Amino acid sequence: MPLGNELLQYLLTGLTLGGIYALIALGFVTIYTVTGHINFTQGEFVMLGALTSISMIKLGLPMWLAITVAVAIVGIFGAAFERVVIYPARNSSVVTIIIITIGFSVAIRGVALLLWGTQSYPMQPFSSGPPINILGAIMNRQSIWVLLLSIVVVITLFIFFERTVMGKALKACAINRLAASLMGISPQKMSLFCFSLCASIGALAGIFITPITTATYDMGLMLGLKGFVAAVLGGLTNTTGAILGGFLLGILEAMGAGLISSGYKDAISFLILLLVLLNRPEGLLGKPERDRV
Amino acid sequence: MSLLEIENLTRNFGGVTAVANMSFQVNTGEIVAFIGPNGAGKTTLFNLITGLIKPDYGTIKFKNIDITGKVPEKIAALGINRTFQNLQLFNGMTVVENVMVGAHRHGKQGLLQAGFSFPGVAKEERFILAKAMEKLELVGLTDKKDIPVEILPYGQQRLLEIARAMAMEPKMLLLDEPAAGLNQGETDILGDLICKLPKMGMTILLVEHNMDLIMRISHHIVVLDHGSKLFEGNPGEVQNDAKVIAAYLGEEIV
Amino acid sequence: MKTKSTKGFLQRNLSIIFFIAIVILIALLIPNPYYLGNFVIIGIFTIVVVGLCLLMGYTGQVSLGHAAFYGLGAYSSALLTAKVGFTPLLAMVIAAVITGIVAFLIGIATLRLKEHYLALATLGSGIIIYIFFNEQVNITGGPSGFSGIPYFSFGSWQFDTERSYYFLVWSFVLLAIIFARNIVSSRIGRALRAIHTSEIAATCMGIPAFQYKVQIFVISAIYASIAGSLYAHYITFMSPSPFGFQASVEFVLMAAIGGLASIWGPLFGVTAVLFLTEFLKTVVPEIMPSAGGEYEIIFFGLILVIVMIFMPEGLVGGIKDYFAKGKIKKLAIKVNQDLAEFPENDLPSDRNKGVQ
Ligand SMILES: Nc1ncnc2c1ncn2[C@@H]1O[C@H](COP(=O)(O)OP(=O)(O)O)[C@@H](O)[C@H]1O
Ligand SMILES: [Mg+2]
């Protein structure tokens, strides 16, 4: 294959990966801006979405209904997680919250292992047909679904934050929690809603990627970390940054895997992360913050 | 002889100019007070001198050494220490431990010496403890030495911060609103304490809102407004300057 | 005079003496080498976790990549002894130096970051090193690993039985704890705690916060490295799997369960977690015969969450708190009584009044 084609191929692969990373990063950023917590459980929502929808399909539900039910279940799970785990610990230190969410994600992974075992579950692509040829590079039909999903989610979120009362309340919380609570917005309700929303987005990401990657009980670990990396690359408090960070990470990773070594692809993404953090701790699009005395 | 020389010091935060083109000098052994309304830039000035933030423009010279833009620990090492408007005590430690942190620089033993418990370590520890106890005595907190700082009453926490800063035995001590939240009795003790410090070799920069205290103890007053130096003089001059009276002192002085 | 100082020494080291007695007692009471083997692992993990507590509990700096330092120590020792032919003790020292240098480089690069960012940076560094173990097949043997690592020896002294290894490892644990205790109770230890609560105030007191953070990061990496060396000569087979992100997380969890800001906490945290794991491994299959794999991590995770919510200071901190509460209450009452002697006392909310 000529180099041009090869690069185009990596770019397409990278866009697919990037779409998923962007969605997971959105979850991190939304929860972080609204509640101030980093939720290491985000990756497990992705896994739960994927495996639950597979079980629903096995139960005989039509695919789109199975997906809807799975997203709803994970959304409710996200809310329950907020109430039972995050709410009681909301005043703890940053480190404590990090440890708690990591601990809970370990527990969820254990439960998934118990329920679904170690095998990987395949899933039918959403639309059948041969891969699409774009200028000599090949793109799965499912990849197009993934890209469509990320675009739809981003647009929906944008409308939600800008046009609805609930969305504006969330945004107010993100800008200034104290001021928002003085205005009669309950940060606790917002936190509950926000976890539920981000769990659902994570679940969607997991379901859409499964026909490409298959689903396993431990898929959430790496996906969650990559989402976090993408979020930090983008600045951690910046929705646009999270999306760009996701796509940037996906493309760099695909290029790295193709041009350098597939074994080192994760090392490459983390190296890029370190380089960005060292030069711009506030991320590519974030604003520097200072300690105030 | 001037100990501290500040020239054209400027610092902006976004659109706000917190310190604007400020110049002044402080002589050794003086008590210099900085007054001005909230937001005038007093704390920012202290943050600039102690290296917590970097100036956009201007120079700071201490003992004729240019310390502009140096890191806080280097500046502290030259003999500058401070207290904080919003208390920054080390919670989770006892009263005496807090002061011992202030005396940190009296020790030389490093991490490895401490880990392997070299002979010098225990001796040094006793020395630091003695220094700390001496300073606690000065602020009258000796009997509270083993209490966790969190449960100390507010006024005593303020005194403790001064003791902690004194434990370094700095040449220059910056006090940011030390009397805030103190009752009359405590304020008097504080005033007497500050008056004694120059004799112990310390030069004092003081930010305070309590005019009685300032008029009683300071040798020199700098009036700030919107980041600029509005007026500078001895207490008598400040008290008689019409501009200052009109703008800041109001009836309280009368 | 002499008796007085001996008494002081005994008092100061009561917990150490108690500790040594328990270590010997366990060796005497447990003749079964398999169970003694569990205690070897507990000892090795304790060394890592004590180092981690110095960094996380005392200095307040997160590391989610410590398993990589543990792995660097293990791989360096394994390679230097099995492939180069160094003696285990020399290899252990060189391994510690290598790990220390790597930690120093990572430390100066990342320790200016705070909280989430530091967590992610250390996590990333750890994963990069882990991938290196997997991918440098011609050096490390890749995922399938290599064997032929000799037992630990000390001149002609071979530590090739469970019992001798048990004593070897726990001697190192003892040294690790004493070293950490000495640091914590020194001026450096106070400085570290000061950095934890207010880095700003600490630097204004002339404490070189960044320099100390790097130093303690290196020390805690060397702790992990030594534990890794001990592990390599115990297992005598090397593969990357015990050194991944999962392991880093488990170290943090053990530290948190024991109590981050405590020297004895790691001992309790590691023991509690490993015993629980062993217990669940035998009990769960009887209740749920169909279950396979490492499902016991469910309980591990849940217990951690519960401990962190209800005892954020960990087991040791929680127990200490329980006993200390009464004492602090009494102190607080006394202080308030003192306060009441100033009737003209201004309330703190009155501060900042004056010229406006
Ligand atoms: N870290 C900071 N970030 C942004 N603005 C700041 C910061 N520190 C101070 N300011 C601004 O600078 C001005 C001076 O503040 P400050 O020095 O605290 O005043 P003072 O101590 O005299 O009350 C204020 O307008 C304040 O809002
Ligand atoms: Mg101020």
Image (cartoon, coloured by chain):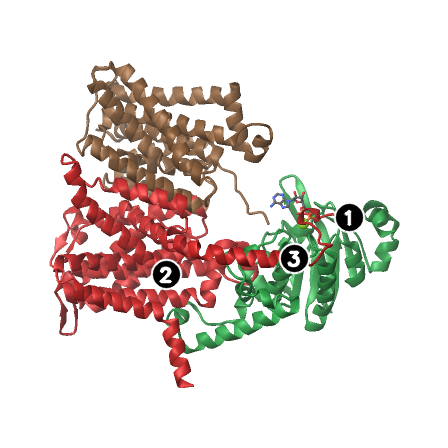
Chain colours: A brown, B green, C red
Q: What residue type is labelled 2?
A: Ile
Residue at image coords 43%, 40%: A89
Q: How crowded is mark 2: few (under 14 residues within 10 Å), some or many (20 or more)?
A: many
Residue A55 seen anywhere in this rendered image of the structure: yes
The reply to whether the C-beta atoms of the residues labelled 2 and 1 are less than 8 Å apart is: no
Give the total of numbered labels.
3
Marks 2/3: CA–CA distance:
36 Å
Callout 3: chain: C
Can you tell which mark lies on residue C355? 1
Mark 2 vs mark 1: in front: 2
Mark 2 vs mark 3: in front: 3
Can you tell which mark lies on residue C263? 2
- For label 2, being within 8 Å of ligand 1 is answered no
Which one is earlier in the sequence, the residue at label 2 or at label 1?
Answer: 2
Q: What residue type is labelled 1?
A: Val
Residue B83 seen anywhere in this rendered image of the structure: no
Read off the residue under disc 3: C339
Residue at image coords 66%, 51%: B43
Marks 1/3: CA–CA distance:
27 Å
